Amino acid sequence: MNEKAVRLTWGDLTLEGILGLPAQALGMVVFAHGSGSGRFSPRNNFVSRYLQHGRVATLLIDLLTPDEAEDRRKVFDIDLLADRVLLATAWLKQDDRTKGLDIGYFGASTGAGAALQAAARDPSSIQAVVSRGGRPDLAEAYLPSVTAPTLLIIGGDDEPVIEMNRAAYRLLSCPKRLVIVPGATHLFEEPGTLEQVAEHALAWFQQHFHHAKYESTGAQTKERLR
């Protein structure tokens, strides 16, 4: 995999990230991590590499600086985290390696709230959103304004979060889908469950990235001409 450490800088703010760029990428996914997690999250790294194998580029980024991450108020400040997701999106749209790619968000736990708020605040920039064991309720006021197709993935044994996601699902007016992975708890630590998350996420992004849809249509046309 072609992964590189990157540093995103705006004035006095610097955020650390990992940029994964497969050859002929179909789109780019920004990861919004849950509370207390960051770019080295093993679960998000697993999903990131699965996406890269499917020709989807990824940006794993620490949404908070090390000092900010020590402040529990900032860890759960969804407005601040959404601001940082939008900053990362702006950076990707300016970087020569990524500026031509469609962008999607993958939010985990509280990060899903930040991803959905960011998607609602800048709808023209985002093609798709995936939430894993997410807390979309943390972006409740923004959910009716989300226009990007949104996939909510929840563990079948994650009871409180299932109800939160069902309530959020009803508020979403965009193209949407809710998937419950049987036998999975909140962190999808059970064998095979995280693989299912990755499979669903890859299919969702491939379905909604414009370049991927164009390639699929072109392949079908070539097949008919044979």
Image: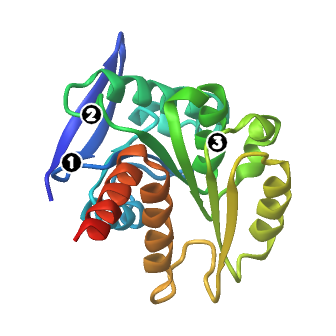
Circles 2 and 3, Cβ within 8 Å, touching? The answer is: no
Please state if 4 lies on the left or on the right of 161 as rendered.
Answer: left
Task: Name the mark on residue 21.
Answer: 1
Quadrant that contains the N terminus? bottom left
The residue sitting at 80% across, 42% down in the picture is 140
Which numbered disc flags the more N-terminal residue, 2 or 3?
2
Viewer-side residue, 69 vs 20: 20
Residue 46 in percent (x, y) is at 35, 67
In this rendering, the answer to whether 216 lies above or below 81 is: below
Structural distance between the alpha carbons of marks 1 and 2: 9 Å
Query: Observer-nearest residue: 143 or 194?
Result: 143
Q: Position of residue 91 (x, y in %)?
A: 35, 24
Q: Residue 116 got which mark? A: 3
Q: For the residues marked 2 and 3, what is the alpha-carbon distance in whole angstroms?
A: 21 Å
Would you say residue 159 is visible in this rendering? yes
Task: State the SS at label 1.
Answer: loop
Q: How many marks?
A: 3
Mark 3: which secondary structure?
Answer: helix
CB contact under 8 Å: marks 1 and 3 = no
Residue 151 place in picture, x, y as percent: 62, 59
In this view, the mark in front (2 or 3): 2
Answer with mark 1 or mark 3, whichever residue precedes in sequence: 1
Q: Write down the quadrant of residue 93 in the picture.
A: top left
**Amino acid type at mark 2:** Thr
